[in-house]
Image: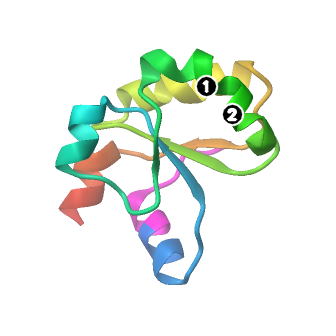
């Protein structure tokens, strides 16, 4: 799946869409700022959370972190685990907040 830009995500949110967003940053980072409605699963704990995400395997899942590196790893991991529609938020939280 192609990645998603912050512009596209914000437009969809303003239109009332509620895509499933997973924030793979550490908990302390999320406490400082978060995308409304996002679910925090730190990258290091993602393998232990797979069972909880089973119903999302064929749905769109947007992953993000601070700049896009950790979420790129999360996208690759989830794709390897059979998730079919994972998109990385380009530029991560830094880009989201800059808009």
Residue at 41% x, 46% y is: 90
Q: Quadrant of the N terminus?
A: top right
> Mark number for residue 40?
none
61 part of magenta stretch:
no
Q: Residues within 10 Å of mark 2 (few under 14, many from 20)?
A: few
Q: Residue at x 30, y 33 (%)?
A: 27
Q: Which residues are magenta?
A: 1-9
Q: Quadrant of residue 35?
A: bottom left
Density class for disc 1 (Cα within 10 Å; few <14, some 14-19, many ≥20) is: few
Circle 2 sits on which residue?
52
Seen at 21% across and 34% down, the residue is 28
Q: Position of residue 61 (x, y in %)?
A: 63, 47
Local SS, label 2: helix
Name which residue lies at 31% across and 29% down.
26
Question: Left or right of 74: which side holds 53?
Answer: right
Residues marked 2 and 1 touching at CB (< 8 Å)? yes
């Amino acid at each position: 799946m192609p990645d998603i830009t912050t512009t596209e995500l914000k437009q969809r949110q303003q239109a009332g869409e509620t895509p499933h967003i997973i924030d793979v940053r550490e908990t302390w980072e999320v406490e400082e700022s978060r995308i409304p409605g996002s679910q925090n699963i730190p990258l290091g704990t993602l393998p232990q959370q797979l069972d909880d995400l089973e119903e999302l395997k064929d749905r769109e899942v947007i992953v993000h972190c601070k700049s896009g590196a950790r979420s790129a790893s999360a996208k690759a991991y989830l794709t390897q685990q059979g998730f079919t529609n994972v998109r990385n938020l380009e530029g991560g939280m830094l880009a989201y907040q800059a808009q």
